[in-house]
């Protein structure tokens, strides 16, 4: 049937009223016809053949159908029917019923619209046959059907629409409806939903019609001239189709509908550049409505048919992205919106042209349009992501951007989506720009880039960069075969991509050209379809290249060129990739052009131009300029794709820029957050390609961050490094030196992570170069008592795992090199899984001539592994001890691990520790065996090691020594190996020999107590005694001590005693030593160095002997002993009188004699020797204390060295006493001693003796405290060490000690002292936080005094400068204490502020008071003596104010509290003081005559005077110069005024530093339960000028300069008071303050008063804030003024301070009655003020 015949037939039909003039059948035939015509458009004439009139009639009829259908609103109509309950849906839809008629009308309308548009777009048709209205109606029908029918039906949302509509009809708001619906008609809604589903079915069936209509409209848009408005409405309406939750199948109608939509919108986009921006903007609101559930979000299947080898490309993407992208798992899907976006960008491609204006030199890229679209989109997108508010908000757009980027990364290599790269580059650029902006803005001021946005940006950039890195890594590792090497056919060689190099029985193919072999499977061939001829990729490439060179210049044809050419052909020969192929070509042309730009010769340029010309010539043609001959193989295609992507210049540029940006931001000085984020981003990148970590640039940047100032950054860096050091030994070595310091990091999390990393390294690589250093540092950390419990656990875990674990295999890494080949080789071979050895030998057919397996090799595998582990551990331990140079760290650690289970540990942890301990104990035996084995090995290697053997032996024996300490039993059976070393003839250097002997003696000392008498007997028969004695003659003090100790221990062993060989040796030794010293006892000339040396040695030896020589001495004898007045009276024993029992007494007398020598070295040695006697006989020490010896030694009159020695000795005595009690040694010894009678046991109670020592030392605490404040730094340290020991034992009242320790925080020059004191404070602070806080005021005073005494030439200041980056940063000296002890508790913090501020408070306004002397007396009794220099107490206030200004507050609540408190103090005292000042000045005419006037409503005369150069001489200050003017009275008032002014400045300073608004300050009350003040992170203004802590400090004789100063302070006070009481109603503070600040500066400039103008980054020392001339006064007047003199001037100040002191003390202890009342009054006063000021 021809079209015209059909027309005739239809016009005759009777018109139908409801569904239109045509019958369904007729329309179906018509549209079928259309399809046929369109399929053979060229051969069939189609509608052009039909008469115009007839056609017009047809179109008019069709238009009727369309118009009818436009009004069909199936979902709404059906829901109306349902809700009116007229009939069931089945009925409504039954043929003949209304519903079915409506369905038919819609269907026919759609069909008619399709036909209409087909007609109008048919070639040769007169445009007038179709009215514009008809076309518009067809467009409208498309939108309408989509919005009213398809979307509700497909998304199943009809019931919601219906409900909405009903609400509107009823005039109900949506919210009211919602409530109602939920309450009542849920059932109804469900029913509606269910019924509506029946209507959805016929609607869904109409999707194909809709799709046809869409494609016809697409044609119409291409061919017809249409109204702009019509098109825009159409596209925005059509876009809604993407809202549909389509299934992922490409067969799904909804899915197809969406693809059709993409086609339609793209057609519009391509044709109307003017509409592009509005279409792009339409995308954004749409994005918020897209399906978001995981299942339906991504519905667009990624087809790989545009890739050279479809399947291998797909699997390439899978292996690239499956772990990286959310949609990386096969099958791959992207979002429809992404597909839409890419289609839109791509369709803008045009044919590149040469710029004619520019002499054809410049190429106009074909991608300009695409790029501008991509950029516009990226800008819009990022704007929406960065800003809050607006449509949807940033928080909704950020995940959308993330999803989009995932999609783009997935498809960026696929030619079909060539635009993906462009969009990615545009986004990358935009994000990078935003991040750079963020890094440029200063931290405090602007918030241009939000932190959350920065997070998103870094996250996305990191992802992109990581994906790029992975592509590059893949390209590096899986390169396309490019070079051809021809081999002969017989010589079978495998060169498959899979890199397996053995032939298998799988199907193999060989290249017909080069005859290299491939696995068929690897190159995509299967048995059923083997080609006749097969060429490998390298050969194809070469063949193509040769072919190409026929048409293109040789110089420019390279692999990339050929790949592009093959790609071109592939895209051109496949249908549907017209746009994609244009994109590909445009990109290629760009690349070629940019290459040509770099060419030097014109000939080369010309050949590029030719090649470009060739490409452009065939731009729209199916054929290529030169047809490539061969395809790539299955595998080669994917590799070619990789090569092409990775070599694309923009891609590399983008990657390099990204890496550069991140590395640069890792060094961003101002923003820790950016540094951290960039580390996180780099972490992602390195995860994708770990080789990047080895780039020097990356390594450098990362290692720098390991010592970043911010904990979070360091932690991030450590975790980044941690991921890689384990995998790669070179990285581990490179980072070692940076990683180790992190063990001392202040951040607990950083330390923990570092330990974990070191553990990983050490376990996986036991021969790691830095192992012993790492182990040693870890041991030190583990035995540091201040280490965090969690970190300690981690450290214990590390060593347990490394050295003491008994479980084998898991941690044993493969391929270890044994250290000693001779000894370990056999065990190593055996431990290498035997089965593999067997297998190998079978395979090779060679029987290894193994000697009969020795016992070791036949042991079970498990045992072997355990054995090897302990050998390894032994090696590591010895190496560690060797590196450390001491076994102290290892010893401490082992002791803690094995002996120190705290009873206080509860529950699981303790149980775990116990379990661990058990395991460790068990391991000790095998470890010790391994150590001895190692010792023997070392001996065997003597020749090989040469001189180095000494160090090895020392370290090994020392390591064994550690075990003898914790588990003597384990060493016992090897004792015979140790004994020879005591002979000290090992052929080592003297130093090594001595160390070996000393270590061996120590082992002996530990083992002796567990020997039995037989074994002792054996020892007696050997040369041991003689050896020990020899050591004492031969070596220095260390070995001497060890030998004597060992000898004493063995001599005092149970049954031996005096009579045994060792006893005799001991007594002989003592006699020898004694004889020498006795002989020279009366000599006092030690100019002979030999003699002196000998004397020193023997004193030390005899001292140690006394220490360990355990004979009992009746306590009463000691009293007689010390009862000697003069040295001359000491009656020395003759050498011959010396016997076993009188050694202590004889030595004591001898030492006393030596103690009085004039040579200081000898005296110290004597004192040390004496302390040996003291340790053995504590009662002697008591007696000595009673006769004043101890005090005399410590007194300031005794020489410094002696004082130092005394302190160290006392500490030693105290420590060893403590140890003796703790270990129960004292008790054990006592029980075992048979020669002590029961009565002696009771009287000489040894436990009691330890308290004797304590008691003796406690008596000396006053002097000890004095010593902590000594000018001598050494003495300060030594006294602190003793103090620490006494504090630990509870022998010193911490209340008294704390102020001194706090004072040492002011020891700004000596960091050792500061740190030491801080450690002690922290310990105390943990025990008694209240006490610490209460003593802070006393500490502040003491600190002030300390600084003045120890650093008399320096200003006292509570501040220290710290360099933070390039900025100087002021820190309070108490910062560390504050952080460690006080910061964590709000109660403690506020208590501290109160205590400090109380120093400023004056309870009584009038100073002189009868009780003041009594009070003074009381304060004298306090531990800290009030100094005579009273003027200094004002500088105390300055000190306290500095402290309050700079403490490291962590929440806004703290500064708020302080400013509030200041407010109330000032509110109470300020007005009173003003009145008193006015009353004082009134007689002189300097204040208003009327008492009732407001005293401070403006500048007064003296303030004006203050602005003059010399205020006291100025015109305004004339009255002051009168005789009657009481300058001293004025000075007192001014001092008070200046302290209040100081407070007011503090308040202002805090407000500005912590950005506290007036509003916030007013809202704040200290009692408020509002936690927000404390939870808020504090914002700190780091660019504050230095706090001005100046205060009136005038000399006693009041010079003119002093008078100027007084007037100045008076003026400052008045001004601040005016500010304080005026600014409350308006927030003029800042501008106000700035103005005045500058004025103040000008004053300060004149008087040298204020040093506020400190620039921000100051490289040089910051000028001190305190006035120079004034403060220099006291030193000028010689030493601190005499007591009486000072008291005259500053009685009120003294009062004030005393007041504070007593108040605080009362708070600490129980209040005395008199003080109590005062205290109550002051607190009452404060109580009154608080609410009133809060109201203000
Ligand atoms: Zn293979
Ligand atoms: Zn080949």
Image (spheres, grey):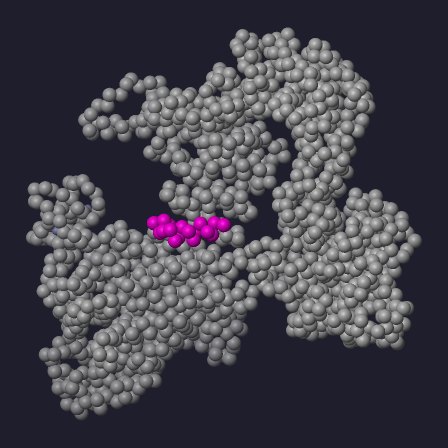
Residue at left offset 21%, top offset 87%: 58
State the image coordinates of residue 1734 (x, y, percent, origin top left). 74, 66
Eyeballing the image, is 585 above or below 637?
below
Eyeballing the image, is 770 above or below 1719?
above
The secondary structure making up most of the magenta span is helix
Residue at the bottom extreme, as displayed: 53
For residue 727: magenta?
no
State the image coordinates of residue 1205 (x, y, percent, origin top left). 68, 31
User: Is there any visible trace of residue 334 in the rendered image?
Assistant: no
Residue at the right extreme, as displayed: 1410
Quadrant for residue 1223, please give it: top right
Task: Compare residues 1309 and 509 and report the one nearer the observer.
Answer: 1309
Total numbered labels placed on residues in the image: 0
Task: Compare residues 1009 and 936 and report the one nearer the observer.
Answer: 936
Residue at left offset 29%, top offset 68%: 419
Task: Compare residues 740 and 619 and report the one nearer the observer.
Answer: 740
Eyeballing the image, is 418 above or below 360?
above
Whether residue 1004 sits left or right of residue 1325 in the image: it is: left
State the image coordinates of residue 376 (x, y, percent, origin top left). 37, 73
For residue 703: magenta?
yes
Quadrant for residue 114, please give it: bottom left
State the image coordinates of residue 1528 (x, y, percent, origin top left). 86, 62
- Residue stretch in magenta: 690-707
Eyeballing the image, is 1394 above or below 179?
above
User: Is there any visible trace of residue 942 in the rendered image?
Assistant: yes
Q: Quadrant of the N terminus?
A: bottom left
Residue at left offset 14%, top offset 51%: 484
Whether residue 921 sits left or right of residue 842 in the image: it is: right
Residue at left offset 34%, top offset 34%: 814
Q: Quadrant of the C terminus?
A: bottom right
């Amino acid at each position: 049937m021809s079209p015209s015949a059909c027309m005739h037939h239809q016009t005759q039909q009777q018109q139908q009223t409801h569904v239109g003039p045509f019958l369904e059948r007729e329309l179906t035939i018509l549209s079928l016809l259309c399809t046929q015509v369109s399929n053979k458009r060229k051969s069939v004439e189609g509608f052009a053949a039909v008469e115009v009139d007839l056609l017009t009639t047809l179109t008019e009829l069709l238009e009727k159908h369309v118009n009818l259908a436009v009004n069909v609103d199936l979902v709404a109509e059906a829901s109306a029917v349902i809700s009116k309950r007229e009939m069931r849906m089945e009925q409504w839809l039954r043929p003949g019923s209304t519903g079915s008629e409506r369905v038919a009308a819609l269907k026919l309308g759609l069909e008619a619209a399709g036909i209409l548009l087909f007609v109008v777009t048919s070639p040769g048709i007169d445009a007038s046959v179709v009215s514009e209205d008809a076309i518009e109606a067809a467009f409208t029908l498309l939108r309408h059907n989509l919005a009213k029918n398809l979307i509700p039906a497909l998304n199943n949302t009809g019931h919601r629409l219906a409900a909405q509509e009903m609400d509107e009809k009823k005039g109900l708001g949506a919210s009211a409806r919602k409530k109602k619906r939920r309450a009542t008609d849920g059932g109804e809604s469900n029913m509606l939903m269910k019924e509506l589903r029946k209507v959805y079915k016929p609607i869904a069936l109409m999707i194909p019609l809709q799709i046809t209509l869409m494609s016809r409209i697409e044609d119409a848009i291409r061919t017809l001239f249409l109204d702009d408005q019509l098109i825009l409405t159409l596209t925005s309406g059509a876009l809604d189709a993407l809202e549909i939750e389509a299934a992922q199948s490409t067969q799904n109608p909804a899915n197809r509908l969406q693809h059709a939509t993409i086609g339609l919108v793209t057609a519009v986009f391509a044709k109307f550049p003017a509409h592009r921006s509005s279409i792009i903007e339409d995308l954004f609101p749409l994005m918020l409505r897209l399906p978001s559930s995981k299942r339906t979000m991504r519905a667009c299947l990624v087809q790989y048919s545009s890739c050279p080898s479809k399947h291998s490309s797909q699997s390439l993407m899978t292996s690239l992205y499956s772990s990286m992208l959310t949609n990386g798992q096969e099958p791959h899907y992207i979002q429809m919106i992404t597909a839409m976006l890419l289609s839109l960008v791509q369709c803008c491609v045009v044919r590149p042209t040469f710029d004619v204006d520019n002499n054809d030199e410049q190429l106009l890229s074909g991608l300009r349009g695409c790029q501008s679209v991509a950029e516009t989109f990226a800008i819009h997108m990022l704007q929406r992501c960065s800003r809050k508010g607006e449509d949807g908000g940033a928080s909704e757009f950020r995940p959308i951007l993330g999803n989009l980027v995932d999609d783009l990364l997935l498809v960026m290599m696929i030619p079909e989506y060539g635009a993906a790269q462009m969009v990615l580059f545009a986004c990358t650029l935009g994000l990078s720009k935003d991040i750079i902006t963020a890094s440029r803005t200063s931290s405090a001021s602007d918030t241009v880039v939000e932190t959350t946005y920065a997070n998103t940006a870094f996250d996305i950039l990191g992802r992109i960069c990581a994906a790029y890195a992975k592509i590059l890594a893949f390209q590096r590792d899986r390169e396309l075969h490019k070079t051809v090497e021809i081999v002969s056919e017989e010589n079978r060689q495998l060169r498959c991509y899979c890199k397996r190099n053995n032939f298998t029985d799988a199907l193999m193919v060989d290249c017909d050209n080069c005859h290299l072999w491939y696995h068929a499977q690897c190159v995509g061939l299967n048995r059923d379809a083997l080609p006749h001829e097969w060429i490998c990729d390298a050969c194809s490439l070469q063949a193509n290249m040769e072919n190409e060179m026929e048409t293109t210049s040789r110089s420019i044809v390279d692999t990339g060129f050929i790949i592009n050419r093959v790609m071109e052909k592939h895209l051109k020969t496949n249908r549907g990739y017209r746009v994609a192929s244009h994109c590909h070509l445009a990109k290629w042309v760009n690349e070629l052009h940019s290459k040509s730009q770099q060419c030097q010769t014109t000939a080369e340029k010309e050949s590029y131009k030719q090649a470009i010309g060739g490409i452009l010539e065939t731009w729209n043609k199916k054929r290529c300029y030169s047809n490539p001959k061969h395809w790539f193989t299955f595998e080669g295609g994917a590799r070619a794709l990789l090569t092409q992507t990775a070599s694309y210049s923009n891609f590399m540029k983008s990657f390099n820029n990204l890496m550069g940006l991140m590395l640069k931001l890792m060094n961003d000085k101002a923003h820790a957050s950016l540094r951290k984020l960039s580390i996180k981003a780099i972490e992602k990148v390195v995860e994708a390609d770990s080789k990047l970590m080895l780039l020097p640039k990356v390594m450098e940047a990362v290692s720098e961050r390991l010592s970043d100032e911010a904990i979070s950054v360091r932690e991030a860096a450590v975790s980044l490094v941690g991921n890689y050091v384990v995998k790669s030994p070179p990285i581990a070595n490179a980072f070692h030196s940076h990683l180790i310091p992190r063990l001392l990091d202040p951040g607990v999390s950083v330390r923990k992570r570092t330990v974990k990393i070191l553990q990983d390294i050490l376990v996986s690589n036991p021969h790691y170069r830095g192992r012993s250093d790492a182990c040693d540092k870890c041991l030190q950390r583990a035995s540091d008592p201040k280490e965090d419990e969690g970190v300690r656990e981690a450290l214990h875990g590390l060593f347990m795992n490394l050295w003491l674990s008994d479980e084998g295999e898991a941690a044993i890494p493969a391929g270890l090199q044994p250290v000693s080949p001779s000894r370990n080789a056999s065990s190593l071979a055996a431990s290498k899984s035997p089965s593999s050895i067997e297998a190998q030998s079978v395979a090779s057919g060679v029987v290894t001539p193994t000697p009969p397996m020795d016992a070791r090799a036949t042991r079970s595998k498990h045992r072997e592994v355990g054995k090897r582990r302990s050998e390894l551990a032994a090696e590591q331990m010895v190496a560690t001890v060797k590196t450390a140079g001491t076994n102290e760290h290892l010893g401490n650690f082992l002791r803690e691990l094995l002996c120190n289970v705290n009873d206080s540990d509860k529950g699981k942890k303790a149980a775990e520790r116990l379990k661990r301990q058990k395991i460790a104990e068990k391991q000790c035996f095998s470890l010790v065996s391994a150590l001895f084995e190692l010792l023997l090995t070392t001996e065997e290697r003597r020749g090989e090691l040469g001189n180095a053997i000494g160090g090895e032996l020392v370290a090994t024996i020392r390591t064994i020594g550690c075990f003898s300490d914790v588990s003597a039993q384990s060493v016992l059976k090897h004792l015979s190996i140790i004994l020879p070393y005591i002979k000290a003839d090992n052929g080592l250097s003297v130093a090594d020999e001595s160390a070996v002997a000393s270590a061996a003696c120590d082992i002996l000392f530990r083992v002796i107590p567990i020997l039995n008498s037989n074994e002792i007997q054996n020892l007696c028969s050997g040369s041991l005694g003689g050896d020990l004695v020899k050591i004492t003659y031969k070596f220095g003090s260390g070995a001497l001590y060890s030998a004597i100790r060992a000898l004493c221990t063995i001599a005092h062993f149970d049954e031996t005693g005096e009579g045994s060989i060792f006893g005799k040796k001991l007594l002989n030794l003592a006699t020898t030593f004694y004889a020498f010293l006795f002989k020279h006892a009366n000599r006092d000339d030690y100019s002979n160095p030999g003699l002196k040396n000998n004397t020193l040695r023997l004193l030390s030896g005899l001292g140690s002997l006394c220490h360990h020589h355990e004979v009992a001495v009746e306590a009463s004898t000691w009293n007689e002993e010390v009862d000697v007045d003069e040295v001359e009276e000491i009656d020395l024993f003759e050498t011959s009188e010396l016997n076993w029992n009188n050694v202590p007494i004889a030595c004591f007398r001898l030492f006393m004699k030596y103690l009085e020598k004039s040579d200081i070295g000898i005296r110290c040695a004597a004192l040390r020797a004496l302390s040996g006697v003291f340790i053995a006989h504590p009662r002697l020490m008591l007696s000595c204390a009673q006769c004043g010896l101890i005090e005399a030694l410590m007194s300031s009159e005794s020489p410094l060295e002696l004082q130092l020695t005394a302190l160290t000795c006392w500490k030693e005595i105290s420590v060893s006493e403590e140890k003796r009690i703790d270990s129960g040694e004292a008790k054990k010894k006592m029980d075992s001693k048979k020669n002590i009678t029961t009565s002696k046991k009771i009287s000489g109670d040894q436990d009691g003796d330890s308290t004797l020592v304590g008691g003796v030392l406690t008596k000396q605490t006053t002097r000890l405290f004095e010593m902590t404040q000594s000018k001598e730094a050494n003495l300060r340290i030594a006294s602190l060490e003793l103090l620490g020991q006494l504090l630990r034992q509870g022998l010193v009242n911490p209340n008294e000690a704390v102020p001194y320790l706090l004072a040492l925080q002011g020891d700004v020059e000596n960091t050792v002292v500061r740190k030491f004191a801080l450690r002690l404070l922290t310990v105390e602070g943990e025990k008694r936080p209240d006490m610490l806080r209460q003593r802070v005021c006393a500490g502040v005073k003491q600190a002030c005094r300390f600084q003045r005494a120890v650093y008399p030439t320096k200003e006292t200041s509570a501040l220290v400068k710290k360099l933070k980056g390039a900025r100087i940063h002021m820190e309070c000296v108490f910062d560390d204490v504050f952080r460690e002890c006080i910061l964590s508790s709000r109660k403690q913090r506020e208590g501290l502020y109160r205590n400090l501020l109380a120093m400023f408070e004056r309870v009584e306004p009038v100073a002189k008071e009868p009780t003041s002397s009594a009070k003074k007396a009381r304060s004298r009794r306090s531990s800290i003596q009030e100094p005579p220099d009273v003027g200094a107490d004002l500088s105390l206030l300055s000190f306290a104010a500095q402290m309050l200004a700079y403490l490291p507050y962590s929440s806004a609540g703290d500064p708020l509290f302080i400013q509030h408190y200041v407010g109330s103090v000032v509110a109470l005292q300020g007005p009173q003081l003003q009145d008193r000042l006015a009353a004082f000045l009134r007689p002189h005419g300097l204040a208003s005559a009327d008492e009732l006037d407001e005293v401070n409503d403006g500048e007064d005369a003296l303030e004006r005077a203050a602005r003059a150069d010399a205020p006291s001489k100025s015109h305004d200050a004339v009255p002051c110069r009168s005789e009657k003017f009481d300058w001293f009275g004025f000075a007192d008032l001014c001092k008070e005024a200046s302290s209040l002014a100081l407070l007011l400045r503090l308040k202002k300073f805090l407000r500005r530093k912590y950005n506290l608004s007036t509003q916030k300050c007013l809202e704040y009350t200290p009692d408020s339960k509002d936690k927000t003040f404390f939870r808020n992170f504090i914002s700190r203004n780091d660019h504050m000028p230095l706090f001005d802590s100046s205060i009136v400090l005038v000399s006693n004789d009041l010079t003119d300069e002093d008078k100027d100063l007084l007037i100045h302070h008076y003026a400052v006070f008045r001004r601040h008071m005016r500010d304080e009481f005026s600014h409350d109603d308006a927030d003029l503070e800042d501008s106000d303050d700035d103005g005045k600040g500058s004025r103040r500066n000008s004053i300060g400039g004149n008087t040298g008063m204020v040093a506020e103008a400190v620039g921000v980054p100051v490289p040089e020392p910051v000028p001190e804030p305190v006035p120079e001339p004034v403060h220099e006064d006291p030193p000028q007047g010689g030493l601190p003024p005499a007591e009486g003199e000072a008291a005259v001037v500053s009685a009120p100040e003294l009062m004030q301070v005393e007041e504070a002191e007593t108040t605080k003390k009362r708070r600490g202890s129980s209040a005395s009655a008199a003080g109590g009342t005062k205290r109550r009054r002051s607190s009452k006063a404060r109580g009154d003020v608080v609410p009133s000021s809060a109201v203000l």
